[in-house]
Image (tube, helix red, strand yellow):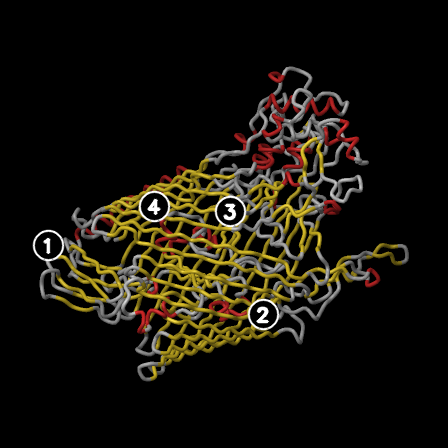
Amino acid sequence: MKLKTTPKMCQSLMKTFTCLFLMLFFTSMLEAQTVSGTVIADGQPLPGATVIVKGTTTGTTTDFDGNFTIAANAESTLVISYVGFATKEILVGNQTQINVTLETDNKLDEVVIIGYGTQRKSDLTGSVSSVSAEDLTAIPVARVDQALQGRASGVQVTQVSGAPGAGTVIRVRGGNSITGSNEPLWVIDGIVVGTNFNLNNINSNDIKSIEILKDASSIAIYGSRGANGVVLVTTKNGAGVGTGKPQISLNLYTSSQILPELPDRLNQREQIEFTNESARFRSAAEPFPDDPSTYPDNDWVDLVLGSAPIYNADLSIAGATDNVNYYTSLNYFNQEGIVKSSGIEKYIFRTNLDIKLSDKVKTGFRLNYSRLEQDNALASFSQAAFGILRTQPIRNDDGSFNGFNDVVGSPFSNPLANRELNTNETFTNNLLATVYVEYSPAPKWTIRSTFSPEFNNTKRNIFRSSQAPDLLSIGDTGQGSASVRTVNSNGWNNENTIQYQSDFGEDHSITALAGASFQKVSTEIAEAEAFGITSDATGFNNLGNSDPTRSVVSSDFTGFQIASFFGRLNYSYKDKYLLTLVGRTDGSSRFAEGNKYEFYPSIAGAWKISEEDFMQDQDIFQDLKLRASWGRSGNQAIGPYRTLGLLTEANTTLNGVEVPGLTLGRPSNPNLQWETTSSFDIALEASLFGGRVFTEFNYYYKETEDLLLDVTIPRQTGFNSQLQNIGSLKNSGWELLINSTNVSNSNFNWNSTVTLSANRNEVLDLGGVDFIDIVVDPIIGSGNTRLIVGESVPSYVGVRYLGTWKSQAEIDASGRTDPQVVGGSHFEDLNGDGIASSEDAVVLGSPFPDLIFGVENNFSYKNWDFSFYFQGTQGNEVYNLNMRNNYFNRGETVKFGDLRNRWTVDNPTSDIPRAGADSVTNSLPNSEYVEDGSHIRLKTVRLAYNFPVEKMGLNGINNATVYFSGTNLLLFSKTRLIDPEASNFGRSNIAQGYLSAQYPNPRVLTLGLNVTF
């Protein structure tokens, strides 16, 4: 599949939306309505707010749903106020519908979402970070997780790839598991969607708020699901829009993705010199004996990569009556990748409906449908930048694609031919829904039940042409191949809660919640592969057009069920002493009988110090709160059926005839149980100087026990290893958040946000051994990664690189017995046995930063808004996998620019190895592979103009904003591969920070328009 929507089609779409905008504009100009409106705060209607016509005694208050009506003429100014919120003044002008959002002047008075409920931040006893809709939509992003980077202290979000649709790696207060998932649990509108939900299915413009639960008190309500933190996503509804006409919002933007800075590499002439020099040292024939100008000079990066557009259009309609509120949206998104032949096209529909059937009964539903069409790249940045020499011809003399590398003497994969001849595409359909009923039999009681189904279907088509030039170059015809893989996943989630809330006298208040949750998910996989396809005519659509003796058919089924029972008690004494008790029992089908159920408790308390009598005569602290929590949470950490033995194919011979059979492929272990994390958190929250500064400091300590690891077992069992519960690790650290209002007056405002966090990850026990060598990839092999008691997970290991040997006398004096050469690599022989080997390995670094930070400043002057945001890390290392081939090894691959200063007879003091030295000295994983991953990134810049719709007489338009933004504009980093956030192994726990020239993160320039009617 090639993405069907061309730029011309997208331009037509933009024109259509522009026409729609104009039509709605002129329609709105003709409409006339009485002056009315709605006051909301924190996304909810605000009853009891005061609305006064400035300079008069005319006034009113909002009703239970936040609605008001008032007599006022066009010259009047409405003054809207409510205790705890900043007063707002609005000129009536020609407006007949005025919807007002009041902003709190105290961060501790904000209402935040928690598990199965809401709570004022001042009443929280747990650690919760909030991200508002304004933060999410200020800078357009393809996925909501990309907008979280640096927004919440203690939450590390890493953009590991710039590929269209690529996700992030998220760690909330470090990683708790080695083999299990360390990703947080995602909960969307109360639907538990898990840790691997494809966030491409959600339109970020539909989101009202995000809360990240971090400590034991806040995550305990999710039990075994929340050990790695919980991300609560709440989508928009019609509440607060008012009972007048529907509110229509239009969001359009177009972006240009620009290639980032590329790694420094040798140019064509320099590469030829290096390759010939390497050959001469090995006494081999020079691959390029002629003048460099006689050979091709193809920049494969320019051929494979290029600037690419993004188009996005959102249309939403929201409204409310006395008994109904609704929100419906359509989203179209098209992103072409900077690696040509990659891209994603998305169609997303959402509708949210809430109905008040009576004073006691409320019902509603949320429905989200998405269709994703993705072109998976048929070429790679790594191949273009480092895998193919510039001298490699693109085509043969007869005009056909070239597929043979003369320097190496073997076929090579031509990315331009792949792009033209082959196919690699993925289609995904996802339906996520929930329906709820809420019943209040008495004012203090609320009973709620939800049912949430999810249906996900994915189909991937791959076709490799028999005309591939690498096949033809060796006469291997008729070797086309194709595969079709389908994955169908269906599941449902049922949540049932009952809540009681009451005050006892003037001093006591409790909120009690009890509930039960049930979930079931099943996944079916079917795949067919065909080989020996001789014709490209049908591609993957007719797998029967192949060699039947080589066809491969496979299928798989997995499923799991979880049953949970939970409760929470919040107690408040005099609104200054707070206590929270939470308990949850989880039962999982992944474990054997006797280990299926586990109980997870937590306790938390808070003291509102500012409410004490001795704090009433000071003017520094408006609010001051101390809180602490302790609790336990779990992690299933294993896939379905891991407690059982695995049957694998094992043919045998019967009466001289080979017959199919099965054998036990892995040992069972019915004793496996949950990984368990115990955590402690203490924090101080403060609102200072009349609410102009809000700060929060957290310290936490987490310890995970019963880690699930593969352990070596006696060979006589018939197996090499078995999954067991052994070992433990810890995470400890601190977080600091500062929000400040630096300047605030009628024309100019300046707000700043700073987030700082540090996490220390350490292995405490590995079942009695000091370390375990880890193979992160079979091709890379061992010797570079270890789990070590006292170190982080993982630790980079290798020998120390000491530069080059400067003379034969130096080699002779060293006592080395392994082969060495002057100008060759000098690796440290730490144990003095005369050989540099893995026995001399030391810890070289860790992917965990000492500090994670984000700094944002927002300015507004009259109708102009300007903001910029920096984020980065300090103290982490990255492992450059390209160093072996592109620094130490022979000249058949593109070399880093550092090698211009390599050792030569004329440059004998260089510490960069000479060309060809690898033929004598084996290149071990070493300290030169490990680079400083500290970096600072100018993540976003935004300039916006808010049209003064009232003064312009646009009475049918609530607001209109045009903006220009830039993303990833600047990056300060010392890594040779430029972007230290990339990751060769995605979300892998034990292989973070490995770089191999992944799909680069582009610079993005965006022009957008937001209009609300």
From what the image shows, is residue 250 above or below residue 68?
above
Of residues 553 and 246, the one nearer the viewer is 246
Mark 3 lies on a secondary structure that is strand
Question: What type is the residue that disc 1 sits on?
Answer: Glu
Residue behind mark 3: 874
What whole-number distance in Å separates the C-alpha atoms at marks 4 and 2? 46 Å
For marks 2 and 1, give the one nearer the viewer: 1
**Within-10-Å neighbours for mark 4: few <14, some 14–19, many 20+:** some
Residue behind mark 1: 75
Question: What type is the residue that disc 2 sits on?
Answer: Gln
Q: Who comes first in sequence, dot 1 or dot 3?
A: 1
Q: Who comes first in sequence, dot 4 or dot 2?
A: 2
What whole-number distance in Å separates the C-alpha atoms at marks 2 and 1? 63 Å
- Residue at image position (71%, 20%) is 286
**In the image, which disc is placed on residue 867?**
4
What whole-number distance in Å separates the C-alpha atoms at marks 4 and 1? 33 Å
What whole-number distance in Å separates the C-alpha atoms at marks 4 and 3? 23 Å
Mark 2 lies on a secondary structure that is strand
Looking at the image, residue 733 sits to the left or right of residue 658; the answer is: left
